Amino acid sequence: MLAVPGIVGLQLGGAADEDVNPSTDTDHALQRVFAASSGGHGQAAAAAFLVFVLLYVPCLATVATFGREFGRRWAALSVTLSLVVAWLAAVGVFQIGRAIAAWF
């Protein structure tokens, strides 16, 4: 339950939670990768990643069905717009997170 907050670097549980759900090497590796790739703003990068994953193209079957119903051009436009919106939202979340971190 506390895996996602642990990945982004938030410690929400007490010592009892750590005994039940210990941090793994994968958690630490993800924290290091997000921190290194974002210039030290790992939490903002992780939040931006989560937003991007929530907003990008849902699945290939959906795109294929959309293409069959409305045509390939509309399907391509849908995929492109979905990726652009997801990227813009992720950049916005990252920049806001970076600004908040600099403010505190």
Image (cartoon, rainbow, N blue to C red):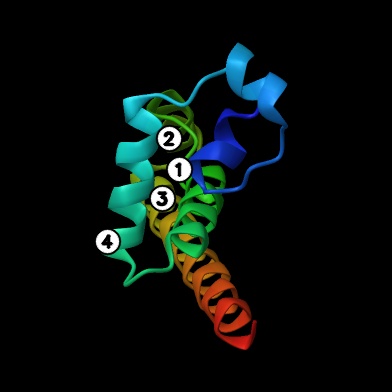
Task: Confirm or deny contact between disc 4 and disc 3 (CB under 8 A).
Answer: no
Q: What percent of the width, then of the height, locates residue 42?
A: 43, 59
Name the N-terminal-most of marks 1 and 3: 1
Residue found at x 51% / y 58%: 43
Q: Which is more N-terminal, label 1 or label 4?
A: 4
Q: Residues within 10 Å of mark 1 (few under 14, many from 20)?
A: some
Secondary structure category for the residue under label 1: loop
Q: CA distance from mark 1 to mark 2?
A: 8 Å
Q: Which numbered mark, 4 or 2, is in the foreground of this view? A: 4
Dot 2 corresponds to which residue? 63
**In the rendered image, which quarter contains the C terminus?**
bottom right
Question: Would you say the residues marked 3 and 2 are in contact, meaning their CB atoms lie under 8 Å apart?
Answer: yes
How many numbered circles does the render carry? 4
Q: Which mark is first along the chain, 2 or 3?
A: 2
The residue labelled by disc 1 is 57
From the image, state whether disc 4 or disc 3 is nearer to you: 4
38 displayed left or right of 92: left
Q: Earlier in the sequence, mark 1 or mark 2?
A: 1
| Up-down relation of residue 102 to residue 69 (above or below) | below
Secondary structure of the residue carrying numbered label 4: helix
Residue appearing at x 27%, y 62% in the figure? 37
Residue type, label 2? Val
The disc labelled 1 sits on which kind of residue?
Answer: Val
Label 3 sits on a secondary structure element that is helix
Q: Are marks 1 and 3 in contact (CB under 8 Å)?
A: yes
Q: Which of labels 1 and 3 is toward the front?
A: 1
* 87 up-or-down from 52: above or below: below
* Residue 54: quadrant of the picture: top right
Q: Residue furthest bottom?
A: 103
Residue 91: x %, y % from top left: 47, 71
Q: What residue did someone put label 4 on? A: 36
